[in-house]
Amino acid sequence: MKNEIQAAYLILENGKIFAGRRIGAEIESIGELVFTTGMTGYLETLTDPGCAGQIILQTFPLIGNCGVISTDLEGDCFAKGYVVRELCDTPSNFRSEYKLDRFLKEQGIPGVCGVDTRAITRIIREEGVMNACICDTSSADLQRLKNYKMRGGVSMVSGKTITEYPAEGTELFYVALLDYGVKRSIIRCLCRRGCRVTVLPHDTPAETVLGLKPDGLVLSNGPGDPAENVYEIVQLQKLIGKLPVFGICLGHQLAALAMGGKVVKLKCGHRGANQPVRLIDGSRTWITNQNHGYVVVSESMEGIAKLSYVNVNDLSCEGLDYPDRRCFTVQFHPEARGGPQDTEFLFDRFIAMMKGEQDAKG
């Protein structure tokens, strides 16, 4: 925090105002206000490209106690703002490089601390996600807030060039990855398993992907409304069924749309490292890391795919299998930095699929 305390306000589109203290960049910002329930992993949350266009509210009251650790960052920071109850000014971690407030300033991310994050979370849970503004005055154009909508999120966060990542140790497989806003840990999980990975821009034509002759294809996570990505969906219609495919988060939703399913927006989304998911037969449950505001409608996939995982809290779709097309997708994050990593076995399932083995669910 600064020695000189500067007032800041979080103004919701429903007219409610929360007064706090300015952190981060000294600019005004409008975004979709969402909450995330993780007790750890604030660096991974802030640098997840899937948070593009969002003002992130942390429900855990103390944030920043580990400082900033550059090797933990998942990508560039595309968030529109940051809201915390208390920002730690004295981080204590042997890996810490500098304070979180400095990171926010350098990334151009405005924030507010000292507000009642429990009360704000309750509003979002009851009324649904809504737009908000971080500013220096206690007044705002509410109609302007209501009109805000992030568009073109995938094109904003996707890499613009083809990037190659070598396998760790002996190369066993060659994987193409369509980058809709990929987290770096997804690439690391593949490379550690002997995969050479080619990361492709989101708008890469299907013919180009197939021309690389990869052993498998990964569809990454990313931000925004999946239905907005019309071109990407058409390309997936040409790809799914031609080679082994593993979809994660937005990739899961895009695959479902490509196969004729439906996706709807959740009231307040699933965000945090404590989201329970169980196998459809009820035999096992895992705690997962999630960051999404949209969900595939399970009923729309009948006759197209098999429902594999459901959310324990609301029974929404968390995974789909397309056995006749050598494709499976999940809504949660199996790479799960910063935790839990219980479902990282799904990368092994993808490896088994590329080997041509009959894959198991774990």
Image (cartoon, grey):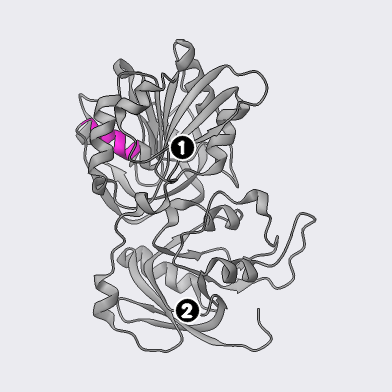
Q: Is residue 260 left or right of residue 326?
A: left
Q: Residues within 10 Å of mark 2 (few under 14, many from 20)?
A: some
Q: Report the disc number at residue 54.
A: none
The reply to whether residue 280 is visible in this rendering is: no
Q: Residue shown at 74%/60% (left/top)?
A: 97
- Is residue 255 placed above or below 174 in the rendered structure? below
Q: Position of residue 168 (x, y in %)?
A: 65, 26
Looking at numbered disc 1 in the image, what kind of residue is underneath it?
A: Ile
Q: Position of residue 237 (x, y in %)?
A: 24, 29
Numbered circles on residues, count:
2
- Mark 1 vs mark 2, CA separation in Å: 34 Å
Element under label 2? Answer: loop
Q: Earlier in the sequence, mark 1 or mark 2?
A: 2
- Is residue 149 placed above or below 140 in the rendered structure? above
Q: Residue shown at 27%/32% (left/top)?
A: 235
Q: Is residue 27 magenta?
A: no
In this rendered view, identify the residue nearer to me: 352 or 298. 352
The main secondary structure of the magenta stretch is helix
Q: Which residues are magenta?
A: 252-259
Q: Which quarter of the figure is the N terminus placed in?
A: bottom right
Q: Report the disc number at residue 162.
A: 1
Q: Report the disc number at residue 27.
A: 2
- Is residue 6 placed above or below 23 in the rendered structure? below
The reply to whether residue 31 is visible in this rendering is: yes
